[in-house]
Image (cartoon, grey):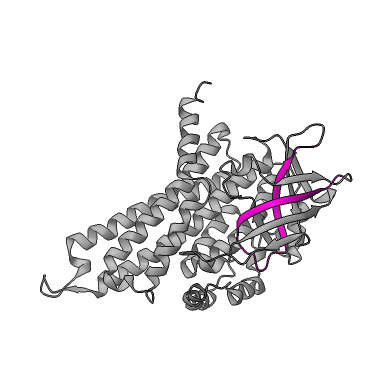
Amino acid sequence: MSVLTEELLERIRERAAGSDERNEFPTEDFDELAGAGYLRSLVPVDLGGSGLSLAQMVGEQMRLAGASGATALAVNMHHVWLAVARVMADRGDDALEFVVREAADGEVLAFGISEPGNDLVLFGSRTEARPDGEGGYTFHGTKIFTSLAPVWTRLGTFGSDHTSPDAPKSVYAFITRSGVETKDDWDTMGMRATQSHTTVLEGARAAADRVVRRLDPGPNPDPLIFGIFSSFEILTSSVYVGIAQRALDLAIEAVRARTSMQHDGTRLAHLPDPRRRIAAAGIALEGARTQLLALARDVDEQVEHGPAWFAKLSSLKLRTTQAAKDVVEHAVRAAGGASYFRRHELSRLYRDVLAGIFHPSSEDSAHQTMATHLLGPVPD
């Protein structure tokens, strides 16, 4: 059952403009969501959660994003780790069971993967992972776009071990705030309330029981990599589809309310060009939402797409974020000049939706992945 009541969503919507304007973390949103149990949506029922499937979580995140894209994107990273744990557990791997139990107890999970100037993303890191001689590691490097920066208590991160006898290895682990500096540097065009500050790892330690994987760098079929890739692409896409739905709803309201002097006071909703614009937005949104839900269900049902999975997932993220951007632009045009004012909700949605182009997989990466899937690798 959803904990996102209409009353809760409306309160979040009413606060969104203020958080954006002040460039501050939406503390009230976060506290209300946590208090309602939203952060335990993917936690199994027997541990006190709602036990939602990935497809159900997609629906919830779309609804939340319609109230506040930034709030939805911030808590999305917490949900991603729980979805990774579920994807792995469904496939017989309980390596992240401790993460689920800690989330059930109230810990807040964040993503410390992206690095400045590193387009390898999951497949290679500039951060040093130094063995501590006890099976654990200390991490030394810089991570960017760390959403939930003001409130996270567990950071899932990775770095490169270049010193062990079997090096190089990519080391994935969870750390606390000890040995971590959070910079106050989030001042962006949109998605301001996520407060996705830069995180500097200054010897942050993961004990042996917090080290999840040591993998060869590069593409890897390991369940952890599949879990991260699928959960991140699907749940992040859900935020932008939710933003697009809200923009379309506002556009429909606008064309129903506005009239044309040129056409003797006819409502715009009855004129060909506005109708076509609304229809184009609806068609783009329908395709993106259908693809998103279909892939989420495929993950839940363990459909075997084999090597096609990564092409499907990267193309999903590209399609949904591009479709969302197109929908919001149609909505802005339909709503007219009023939407250009900062006080108009569409102005914020227009800025927020642009953040979609910066999440992995990038446009170039998605095309490269699909080309490799369809044509094979480029010969050396």
The span shown in magenta is 135-163
In this view, 167 is above or below 35: above
* 123 left or right, relative to 293: right
**Residue at 83% across, 50% down:** 209
Residue 146 on the magenta segment: yes
Disc count in the image? 0
Residue 46 appears anywhere in the view: no
Q: Main secondary structure of the magenta part?
A: strand
Q: Position of residue 134 (x, y in %)?
A: 89, 46
Q: Nearer the viewer, residue 187 or 62?
A: 187
* Residue reaching furthest to the top: 379
Where, by quadrant of the figure, is residue 163 drawn?
top right
Please state which of residues 302 and 372 is positioned toward the viewer in this rendering: 372
In front of the other: 22 or 248: 22
Q: Quadrant of the N terminus?
A: bottom right
Q: Position of residue 369 (x, y in %)?
A: 50, 35
Q: Residue at x 26, y 59 (%)?
A: 277
Residue 169 visible (yes or no) = yes
Q: Residue at x 77, y 55 (%)?
A: 204
Q: Position of residue 156 (x, y in %)?
A: 70, 53
Among all residues in the image, which is located at the extreme right?
134
- The correct choice, above or below, for 28 with respect to 196 in the image is below
Q: Is residue 229 magenta?
A: no
Q: Judge from the rendering whether residue 274 lies leftward or rightward of residue 18; answer left or right.
A: left
* 112 or 2, nearer to the observer: 112
